[in-house]
Amino acid sequence: MKQQRVSLTLPKKILEEAEKMAKERLEDRSTAIRELLAIGITEYRENTAVRDYAEGKLSLGKAAETAGVSMWRFIDLLKERKVPLKYDLDALKEEIEAVSTA
């Protein structure tokens, strides 16, 4: 992945936590901050997809795609967050067939 240099201002607490993480993992601070940002972005995508699915804005397949995970992992996310699956059996079969042939 191509990297670009950015400059940003962080709250002292966040910087201290990133430095602590870097030290624990024997990494430099920039690597730790990149990893933390990646984790945050993943969590944001998952939260957004779960919310939009729960509100009926996205289908199960589209929500999984938005979250950047497989449909099976997305179903696990819904279960973990106690969001009911909104599917009848025929629609679920169609989604599974579409994903398995892609």
Image (tube, rainbow, N blue to C red):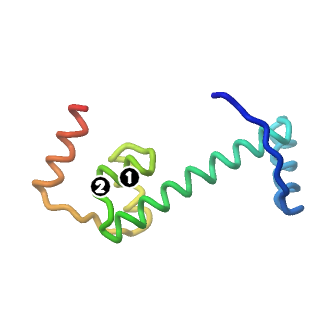
Label 2 Cα neighbours within 10 Å, binned few <14 / some 14-19 / many ≥20: many
Residue 24: image x %, image y %? 83, 43
- The quadrant of the image that shows the N terminus is top right
Does dot 1 land on a helix, a strand or a loop? helix
40 vs 31: above or below:
below
Residue 58: image x %, image y %? 32, 60
56 vs 99: above or below:
below
Name which quarter of the figure residue 88 lies in: bottom left
Q: Is residue 40 left or right of residue 26?
A: left
Q: Earlier in the sequence, mark 2 or mark 1?
A: 2
Q: Residue furthest left?
A: 90
Residue ID for mark 2: 60
Name which quarter of the figure residue 22 lies in: top right
Q: Amino acid at mark 1?
A: Phe
Which is more toward the observer, 30 or 79?
Answer: 30
Name which quarter of the figure residue 17 lies in: bottom right
Please report contact status of discs 2 and 1: CB closer than 8 Å, yes or no: yes
Q: Amino acid at mark 2?
A: Leu
Which is more toward the observer, 77 or 4?
Answer: 4
- The quadrant of the image that shows the C terminus is top left
Residue 93: image x %, image y %? 14, 48
* Residue plotted at (18% across, 52% down): 92
* Residue plotted at (21% across, 43% down): 96
Nearest to the eye among marks 2 and 1: give it. 2
Residue ID for mark 1: 74
Residue 10: image x %, image y %? 83, 58
